[in-house]
């Protein structure tokens, strides 16, 4: 099943237990992965999100596949480590929005996500890059990243996506639009905007004032990656 498709059967599991469902899902994930035939070389429960990046970097050199459990923020802080590496990146969507998993059709429930890792096929994805920071799903400037960066952890943990909506209403009251200039190489348009997003995940730092200019080439580099 897995061998002809080249999907590793050995992996290291790293779970951000600060993500919405991370703490409660860790033991179940270990059990489900083992039962599905994935041999865990190591399993790490990380309480400090700031350590996730280093934990993943360390794991990449020790396993053919690294399974990262967390939300879009966890993904954004670790995806850079997989660029130009042969290590397979696999995801357990344990966050609030899980936009990256939704875009790729990865089941949001733990058993379904584990089944993809155990029986799925590797897929290559493009990574966008802004100012040296790679992203796998989307990037935005303005209101939405401000909400994502400032929403209280307890609010989104207990209210989920509703918590984002509540915080958006609070933050949006004092948000000031900014001037956005967009060029496509032929034409140029300048307008007032509250945000600008690109499909393509870590938000670019929020902008409260000043001008943003997106050049014709958009400074976006596509880099191949691998996804279980």
Image (cartoon, helix red, strand yellow):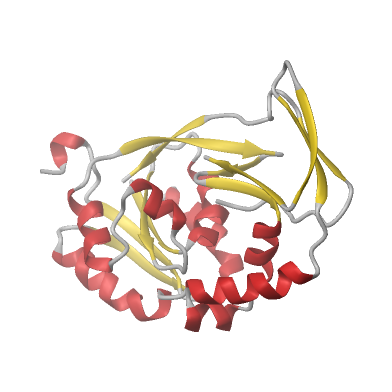
x and y, in percent, of residue 223 in the image? 51, 31
Pick out the residue farthest to the left: 1
- Side (left or right) of 189 relative to 21: right
| Rendering coords of residue 56 (x, y %) | 48, 56
**Is the residue 127 above or below the residue 44 in the image?**
above
Q: Quadrant of residue 221?
A: top right
* Residue name at image x 28 percent, y 67 percent: 109
Which residue reaches farthest right?
210
Question: Left or right: 71 with respect to 26?
Answer: right
- Please, is residue 28 above or below residue 186 in the view? below
Looking at the rendered image, the quarter that the N terminus falls into is: top left
Tally of numbered tags: 0
- Asked if residue 63 can be seen in this view, the reply is no
| Residue drawn at x 75%, y 27% as measured from the top left | 215
Q: Relative to 135, does residue 47 appear above or below in the rendering?
A: below
Q: Residue at x 69, y 22 (%)?
A: 184
- Tell me: residue 215, above or below residue 177: above
* One can see residue 82 in this view: yes
Q: Is residue 93 left or right of residue 162?
A: left
Residue 196, by quadrant, is top right
- Residue 203: image x %, image y %? 64, 53
Which residue is nearer to you in this view: 132 or 205? 205
In percent of width and height, residue 157 lies at: 50, 79
């Amino acid at each position: 099943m897995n061998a002809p498709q080249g999907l590793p059967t050995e992996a290291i599991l790293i779970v951000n237990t600060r993500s919405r469902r991370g703490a409660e899902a860790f033991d179940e994930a270990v059990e489900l992965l083992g039962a599905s035939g994935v041999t865990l070389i190591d399993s790490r429960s990380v309480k400090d999100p700031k350590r996730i990046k280093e934990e993943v970097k360390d794991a990449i050199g020790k396993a053919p596949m690294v399974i990262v459990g967390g939300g879009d923020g966890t993904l954004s802080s670790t995806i850079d480590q997989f660029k130009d590496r042969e290590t397979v990146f696999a995801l357990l969507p344990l966050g609030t929005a899980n936009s990256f998993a939704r875009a790729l059709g990865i089941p949001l429930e733990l058993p379904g996500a584990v089944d993809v890792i155990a029986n799925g096929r590797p897929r290559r994805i493009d990574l966008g890059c802004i100012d040296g920071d790679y992203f796998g799903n989307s990037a935005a400037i303005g209101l939405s990243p401000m909400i994502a960066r400032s929403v209280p952890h307890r609010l989104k943990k207990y209210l989920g996506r509703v918590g984002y909506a509540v915080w958006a209403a609070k933050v949006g009251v004092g948000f000031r639009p900014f001037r956005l200039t967009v060029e496509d190489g032929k034409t140029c348009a300048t307008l007032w905007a509250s945000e600008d997003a690109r499909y393509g995940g870590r938000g670019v730092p929020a902008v409260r004032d000043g001008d943003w200019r997106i050049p014709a080439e958009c400074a976006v580099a596509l880099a191949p990656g691998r996804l279980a």
